[in-house]
């Protein structure tokens, strides 16, 4: 009996120690969680106050008639019905934006990849060249560059002065509906620095052994690019496509400055974001502008989802096993 009692006593003491250990571990985890949430608190406050909160308010306003001067009046789906059924300028803005994105994004990525491959070589002073080529991305979205672009492609701008040396009388490139959007596409392509840096980082990760093996097999530079570089860069290409597409749909400053805020000539530079701005701050139709913003969000979200779905057919990851 004494032995049984001793065993029971030892078991009870062991259970107490285990319980204390578990309680101590739980207390430590709770303290660590509280510390983590405390460090996250500034970000959480910023997210709910400056992002989630305004988005919910915007969603509510999209179902109202609101002019910033009076209380919102609930109108249901009227803003969306008017947009889709009766607003011709909305359709024009959508078309202009899709054309801009469809031209600027592929050309920008092609140009960025070309420059990245040149800068990937061991050249003296290559770090300086990288900084110089990245500079347009830092300045491209600024008001000053947009003003400079307007002067370059104006009737008496530098482009026409250069053409005049060859006896060519150039038009006002930003003042003609057929060429105004093209000038903004050129400006968008000029801002290739950000995807170039990402491409360059991807090129640095490709093992040189693969190129050496390809050379031994008799592959020339074009074949090496097609069979080695492109497949291994597909995750980087996919990332740049998604990010640059989203960024291009949000483009605003160049169109606003070049057209003087009108989207002209003949709505040739009427970007979606510019039309949204006109409705919200020129016409004081903040409810309608909120509906425009949510439609833009749905369009960008749908295109991003399509890109992710299509990526499974062409994006190659090194750890895949077919």
Image (cartoon, rainbow, N blue to C red):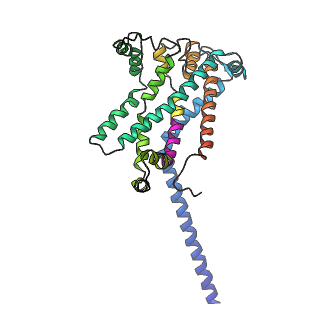
Q: Position of residue 294 (x, y in %)?
A: 63, 28
Q: Position of residue 34 (x, y in %)?
A: 51, 50
Looking at the rendering, which quadrant does residue 162 occupy?
Answer: top left
Residue at screen point 57% across, 58% down: 321
For the C terminus, the image quarter is: bottom right
Residue at screen point 46% across, 47% down: 223
Residue that sits furthest to the left in the current view: 124
Can residue 93 be seen in this snapshot? yes
Residue at screen point 39% across, 21% down: 145
The answer to if 29 sits in the magenta stretch is no
Q: Main secondary structure of the magenta part?
A: helix
Boundaries of the magenta span: 231-243
Depth check: give the residue in front, 154 or 210: 210
User: In the visual, does 60 lie left or right of 268?
Assistant: right
Depth check: give the residue in front, 142 or 306: 306
Looking at the rendering, which quadrant does residue 65 occupy?
Answer: top right
User: In the visual, does 143 lie left or right of 276?
Assistant: left
């Amino acid at each position: 009996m004494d032995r049984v009692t001793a065993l029971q006593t030892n078991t009870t003491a062991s259970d107490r120690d285990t319980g204390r250990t578990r309680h101590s571990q739980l207390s430590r985890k709770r303290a660590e969680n509280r510390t983590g949430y405390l460090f996250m608190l500034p970000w959480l406050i910023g997210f709910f106050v400056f992002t989630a909160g305004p988005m919910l308010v915007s969603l509510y306003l999209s179902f109202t008639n609101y002019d910033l001067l009076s209380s919102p009046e609930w109108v249901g789906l009227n803003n969306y019905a008017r947009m889709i059924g009766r607003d011709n300028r909305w359709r024009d803005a959508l078309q202009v934006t899709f054309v801009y994105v469809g031209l600027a994004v592929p050309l920008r990525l092609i140009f960025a990849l070309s420059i990245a491959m040149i800068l990937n070589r061991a050249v003296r002073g290559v770090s300086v060249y990288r900084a110089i080529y990245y500079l347009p991305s830092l300045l491209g979205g600024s008001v000053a560059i947009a003003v400079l672009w307007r002067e370059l492609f104006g009737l008496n701008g530098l482009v026409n002065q250069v053409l005049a040396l060859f006896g060519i009388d150039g038009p006002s490139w930003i003042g003609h509906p057929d060429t105004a959007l093209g000038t903004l596409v050129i400006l968008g392509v000029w801002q290739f620095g950000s995807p170039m840096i990402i491409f360059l980082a991807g090129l640095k990760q490709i093992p040189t052994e693969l190129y050496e093996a390809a050379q031994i097999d008799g592959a020339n530079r074009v074949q090496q690019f097609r069979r080695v570089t492109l497949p291994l860069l597909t995750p980087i290409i996919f990332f740049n496509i998604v990010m640059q597409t989203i960024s291009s749909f949000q483009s605003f400053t160049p169109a606003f400055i070049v057209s003087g805020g009108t989207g002209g000539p003949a709505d040739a530079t009427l970007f979606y974001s510019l039309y949204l701005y006109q409705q919200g701050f020129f016409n004081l139709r903040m409810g309608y502008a909120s509906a425009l913003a949510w439609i833009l969000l749905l369009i960008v979200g749908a295109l991003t989802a399509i890109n992710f779905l299509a990526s499974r057919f062409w994006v190659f990851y090194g750890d895949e096993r077919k």
